[in-house]
Amino acid sequence: MIAGIASATGVAHADPDPADQAREIVESATGDADLEDEHDHAPRRFDYSRFSDGPRRVPTPRGASKLRAEELGLGTRECAHQLLHGRPLDAWVAAARGREPSRLLWPVDDGRWVRGYGYVRTTRPDLIHRGIDIAADPGTVVRAAADGIVAYSDNGVRGYGNLVLIVHANGWVSLYAHNARTTVQPGYRVRRGERIALVGRTGIARGPHLHFELWHEGRAMNPAALFDGGPTFVQRLATRAAASGRVAPPEEVTAEDRPIEAPLAPHPEDVVTVATTASVTPVAPTEPVLRELDGLELGSLALARRLLSRAASDAMLSRVEGRVFSTLLFPVRDGTVARAFRSSRVAMQLVGAPDAAVRAAADGLVVFAGELPGRGPSIVLLHRNGWVTAYVGVGVLAAEVGTRVERGAWIARMGATPIELELRIGGVARDPGALLVTPTP
């Protein structure tokens, strides 16, 4: 093994002692290691010999991604070492393309926050935990927190198990460890919200969870204040803030209710030094509130009916931001197709567990969130390429009219009955089936 690859401390060591290096490996990879201090030669309080980095379950490199990885030197342990001890090469950052992130998507749908960043260990409070731990059932989908390029997808970094490292266009590096398997290969350009792995317990892990880290310039950062969270994460923060008297208890938690734990600079400056203060300071809007499209009020039935029956005007599309996709993300977490598209009158039906997250199929603008007469609570999104997607008959609405959402963002919850997914192109109903990218294995 290349000296120093396994350490994720971000501190260079000259000719490290193997025993000291082993301690760094364990402490960087586990949530609550029980090793003695490097100057303490007492017997270990916990036997880590029973942990294994395997089984190694990673994709076989092939195609354009393989060629790109070979050209850039991605996918190697040398690459992993560079990312965890220094800054990514300029060529890697340039290859990431995509949108420069100023926020992060919560990477595990309904994942439970179990350990934060900092001196939070119970057994060794003197040692820093350089990431956050998110518990979830084995096999739960792990998603990319932001656009980027997969720099490493293997299990050659001791203690982390099956590991994914992604380089982002602003120089950030995100780390996803302990996976049951990874589902992307080095060199692949990944989109925010796209599946990259499945939750597991490979490496030094006592139970199934995702260990997530965010790095910049060879230093770990606290990512907590950057997350746009899933339902569980949003609910936890909102409940905590309400209990402390900082905000009123929301009737229905949405991303707007999520208390901001530290002020963030607006895009595109992307300040990367994240404050760790516990204060909750709301961020003022940085752009005018959008209230209408081409003379039709946002959130009105008139606008919803207009977009579901006719093509969006150029004036409407000029107000829509976001990326353009040629596919649609399957919107229901762990859901399935109950009925295929048949016609404009018989839409595709999707089923999923009650309260399962319903996500935006692509970047877009929420133009309607309310009751469609005779059809139940519904969300309608307008996308920059002119597509319109409608999520009809959801259980709980979780997106506000006028919100610009990204692909994979949580916009609703499932109820007890199936929902209908509609795709309109130029006002004509189209079959979304061939465009769906199913996130489940």
Image (cartoon, rainbow, N blue to C red):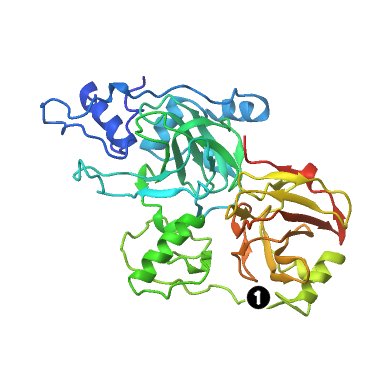
Q: Say which quadrant the N terminus sits in.
A: top left
Q: Is residue 439 visible?
A: yes
Q: Is residue 400 above or below residue 139?
A: below
- Which of the 4 image quadrants contains residue 434? top right
User: Where does the image place residue 311, in percent across and percent down from the top left?
Assistant: 85, 64
**Tag 1 residue:** 290
- Which of the 4 image quadrants contains residue 413? bottom right
Side of 383 where 192 appears, left or right: left
Q: Is residue 310 visible?
A: no
Q: Residue at x 72, y 49 (%)?
A: 350
Side of 70 where 417 appears, left or right: right
Q: Residue furthest front?
A: 416
**Along the viewing direction, whichever of 257 and 295 lies nearer the viewer:** 257
Q: Is residue 64 above or below residue 246?
A: above
**Along the viewing direction, whichever of 57 and 371 lies nearer the viewer:** 371
Q: Is residue 103 above or below residue 97?
A: below
Side of 381 where 48 appears, left or right: left
Q: Is residue 148 above or below residue 12?
A: below
The amino acid beneath tag 1 is Leu
Q: Say which quadrant the C terminus sits in.
A: top right
- Which of the 4 image quadrants contains residue 366? bottom right
Side of 315 where 404 appears, left or right: left
User: Where does the image place residue 430, in percent across and percent down from the top left?
Assistant: 85, 52
Q: SS at mark 1? A: loop
Q: Residue furthest top?
A: 1
